[in-house]
Amino acid sequence: MIIIYPIVEGHGDERAMPILIRRLLSERFGFYEVKVLHPYRLPKGKMLHADQWPAVVSLACERLNDARENEDDVVLILVVCDADDDCPVELKNTMEDHVAAVISDTNFEVVVPQPEYESWFLAAANSFVGHSDCRENVAAVTDILRIRDAKGYFERNILKEGRFYSETVDQPKFSALLNFNGMPEAESRSLRRLIDVFSRLLPNNNDPL
């Protein structure tokens, strides 16, 4: 079994990440032996301060150890934080440096959606064709990194006219619909990294990544 403790920055992410992880593992990898623990919410500003991490990592390791059913279980602390206008590589490196001093024997990964979580929806826009909340014709989205407001773009171009986007409601709802078999990572480097994290973690994985 794989046991995952997500650390996220917002209320929408808190609800969406367990759904997204299960969706990815089941649809892309055909893997169902996963337990996603309730995410820990840590605002982005605090993620960048080293003194925030010892207590968070201690709690994460405690929760993961409590959830283990046998010694073969694989555990992972997964941090997901929007890049916004920051460099995703610098954000990732900063958090990894902070954690390196307080963790040694637990898998720890940082994935930074660029510029934000909803960019992954744009990369997989065909996933929403035919959904009752979406337009009849959902066009593929390219040059996603040029779209600074992915939430607004999703609302204006994919949701039906007059339908407003709510992070706490829509982030989990549309995460459950993502079509990972359509190779959405071709349009999103950060989504490719998320998939690669699990590709490396899963035993006997034959995914083309």
Image (tube, rainbow, N blue to C red):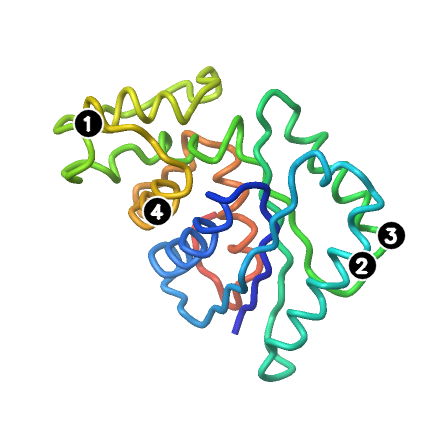
Residue 191, position as x, y percentages in the image: 48, 39
The residue labelled by disc 2 is 103
Disc 4 + disc 2, Cβ < 8 Å: no
Give the spatial CA distance, label 3 vs label 4.
35 Å
Q: Residue at x 52, y 55 (%)?
A: 198
Quadrant hosting residue 126: top left
Give the spatial CA distance, label 1 vs label 3.
48 Å
Disc 2 + disc 3, Cβ < 8 Å: no
Residue 86, position as x, y percentages in the image: 65, 23
The residue labelled by disc 3 is 101
Disc 4 + disc 1, Cβ < 8 Å: no
Q: Nearer the viewer, mark 4 or mark 1?
A: 1
Say above or below: 179 vs 68: above
Residue occupying the far right of the picture: 101
Give the spatial CA distance, label 4 vs label 2.
31 Å
- Mark 4 or mark 2: name the one nearer the start of the chain: 2
Give the number of the disc on residue 160: 1
The kind of residue on which mark 4 rests is Phe
The residue labelled by disc 4 is 180
Q: Residue at x 72, y 63 (%)?
A: 59
Residue 112, position as x, y percentages in the image: 59, 36
